[in-house]
Image (spheres, helix red, strand yellow):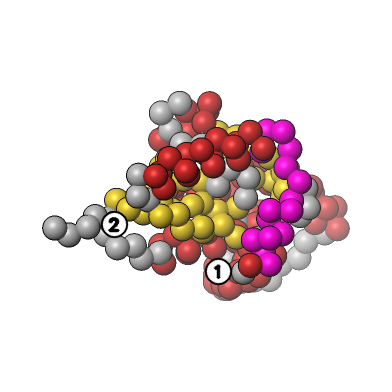
Amino acid sequence: MDRRKQQKKERKLTAAEQKRKEMFLEKKAALEAEGFEAHDLTISAVYANAMALVLALPIVLVLWAVFVWKNGHGSISSPMLLGVLVLFFLLLVVHEAIHGLFWSFFAKNKWKSISFGIMWNSLTPYCTCQEELTKGQYAIGGIMPCVLLGILPAIAAIFGGNLPLFWLSALMILAAGGDLTILWKLFRFRGSKGEVRFLDHPYEAGLVIFERTFSKV
């Protein structure tokens, strides 16, 4: 854990990331001065990829079992497979845009509070919201790419018997493994029933929870 945090600190930030970091640290200091304690729920790219096998792969396997039960295994040609891979990489950008779209619905400053970037050390694109969100709002923005680009198209592929669409959907569900991991950590977090605030991390995958426990008189 300490080594992972150290690696995060050593990652070279862009000018935009550095600016967001400074704003985040100012807000963090202000909240801590008010008695809030920070809980880091960020994850590394390596951990996200590993957890994708735990959280996302079972979803794909269940959907695949249903596809085979209804349509058989089918086959996919090399040109179609290439097309699936090309669309997959293009949809990674759409994936992040969907995060931003739904979080912007809840943010007071809408799109002005949404930023995008790339973690160049792992070639991982990301979206971040600079405003505080509720737990439900954060979860909605976090899960929607998996739903809109993965689960719903997979269901459509099952009913339509469309194998290329199914495999594209399966790849998008696996690509959402990091999102599922963050949400898993979010809903596993058990605070002390005090005041809680949720703030997306400005340049890493995940969020920071700020919790203030009310002292009993």
Q: Where is residue 51 in the image (x, y as percent from the top left)?
A: 60, 69
Residue ID for mark 2? 213
Q: Position of residue 193 (x, y in %)?
A: 26, 59
Q: What stretch is highlighted in magenta?
A: 3-17
Residue type at mark 1 is Leu
Viewer-nearest residue: 111 or 131: 131
Tag of residue 55: 1
Of labels 1 and 2, earlier in sequence is: 1
Residue drawn at the location 46% of the way across and 58% of the way down: 39
Magenta stretch prevailing secondary structure? helix
Helix, strand or loop at mark 1: helix
Q: Can residue 160 be seen in this view?
A: no
Quadrant (top left/top right/bottom left/bottom right) for the N terminus: bottom right
Q: Is residue 59 visible?
A: yes
Helix, strand or loop at mark 2: loop
Give yes or no for residue 98 being in the magenta stretch: no
Quarter of the rendering containing residue 49: bottom right
Badge 1 density bin: few <14, some 14–19, many ≥20, Cα 10 Å: many
Badge 2 density bin: few <14, some 14–19, many ≥20, Cα 10 Å: some
Viewer-nearest residue: 180 or 9: 9
> From what the image shows, is residue 176 above or below residue 19?
below
